[in-house]
Amino acid sequence: MILCHVDKIFDDIPVASSFDLDSKPAIITDNHSFAGYLHSFEKQNSVLFFDNVDQVIQLADKNSSKKFLLNLGIPTNPLVDSRELLMKFFNKIKPYKNIEVLFANGWDYYSGKLYKTTTTRKELIVNRKDLYLEAISTVGITLNRIHFWICNVFEVNTFKRHFHPADVQYFSIYPKRMMVQQCKAGLDVYRAPNKSVQREWHFLCLNNYDKPHRTQLVEAFRNNPNLKDKVLYSYLNPQKAELQRHVDGIHDPDQLTEWQDALPHHIPDSCYFYISTETHFDNEKTLIEINEDKFDNPVQGWWSEKTFKAMYYELPFLIVAPTSTLKFLREIGFETFPEIFDETYDNIVDSHERLELIKGEIFRICSMSKKEIHDLYYSDSVQRKLKHNKLLFLDLERDTPYNIFYNYNTPEMELIPHKEFVHFYTTLKNYE
């Protein structure tokens, strides 16, 4: 199969990036799913670039024995989806049965539903699942030519139910992005200290941009004398200047992607547990405002590198995130830690109540002695879960679906000139 990137579909069909929240209806040709992929790692003749889809059609027509996968995207904002544009596109490629279509969003896919909210009512405006089903069924393109690679467990479950036998997979760019940035920073694959090492802090909590839930936690860390020497935390860009704090030096905010995933290893080495303060905490996220109308995008089944860091750095975790985030993590195989934390917070819909319960767990754990949490961290059950989560995280990186077009885990990797990547990925491939 050949992966096909296109700059645009047709001259008269608008295109956009997955991140264009205020775009007019369009088809996404830039899905931002290649964080960490290098051109030098491409398998020979497996990744091609085109100006438009007509060029793909011409090549596919001449090579009927080969399969071509059109790499498109899914917008973060469901208002950008268009049934009419999708139908026009499907009608164009339908006769060429060796062309398949990939719709990917491995970055920010909060939900396929969008609601218009007023003071008196909440109205469903877009349901992506229905929109895509209508476009596909109306044109009559077969589902075995359709692929959905998306970073949202709830949406994966929904699409698997309704789009069988389409290829539907959980796909996140964050594991690959994290590993590549580790390598660029000159870090080896992380391994946690052994039991003989006494750690300094109860919790690690990393925060960048200002969010109300982060501010409330940081103020608790700052103002409670029982937490000051128990929680190692950062807050890089708070609105309240007095809350700003760094744990690994001051970084250029314009180079965020170069350093946020490459935490110096001595920092997680010094902490027993981790608090993930996710991008969103409320179950309803206001995605966009147009002419004073608010459009809400419910967040469920999505998380970012902020949570994956707990898996990679082998730390039991609390997650300050929307309801059921722990539940969705468990659905794809990760294990959580009810032997350490009261995880009933994950079931609470009210945001204030959920945050108060999480804060209560932080206070409770911080009241425990270093010996108690050391023994708890190194208990057999916790260590087994940490190793399991680490391997599952690495599998998400090693088995990311785009890897079939690249040489990250193949013998040909040895021929690639970026020797630091070869060394890192050889270690990663053999990690057990």
Image (spheres, helix red, strand yellow):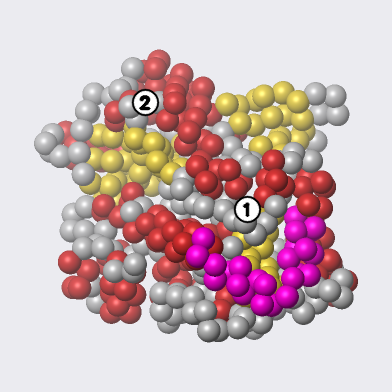
Can you tell which quarter of the image residue 409 is in?
bottom left
Q: In the displayed structure, does residue 86 sit left or right of residue 307?
A: left
310 or 6: nearer the viewer: 310
Which sits earlier in the primary sequence, circle 1 or circle 2? 2
Where's residue 4, x and y in %?
A: 29, 46
* Amino acid type at image mark 1: Pro
Marks 1 and 2, how far apart in space? 35 Å
User: Do tag 1 and tag 2 residues touch (Cβ < 8 Å)?
Assistant: no
**Residue type, label 2:** His
Magenta stretch secondary structure, dominant: helix
Graded by Cα atoms within 10 Å as few (under 14), some (14 to 19) or many (20 or more), the crowding at tag 1 reads few
Asked if 235 appears above or below 211 in the picture, the reply is below
Check residue 168 for magenta coloring.
Answer: no
Residue in view at x 34 percent, y 59 percent: 398
Work out which quarter of the rendered image holds the C terminus and state it. Answer: bottom left
Read off the magenta span: 358-381
Q: Position of residue 389 (x, y in %)?
A: 47, 58
Q: Which residue is mark 1?
A: 338
The image shows residue 82 at horizontal and vertical percentages of 51, 28
**Residue to which mark 2 is pinned:** 164
Residue 424 visible in the picture: yes
- Residue 149 drawn above or below residue 391: above
Magenta stretch: includes residue 379: yes
Is residue 98 toward the left or the right of residue 187 in the image? left
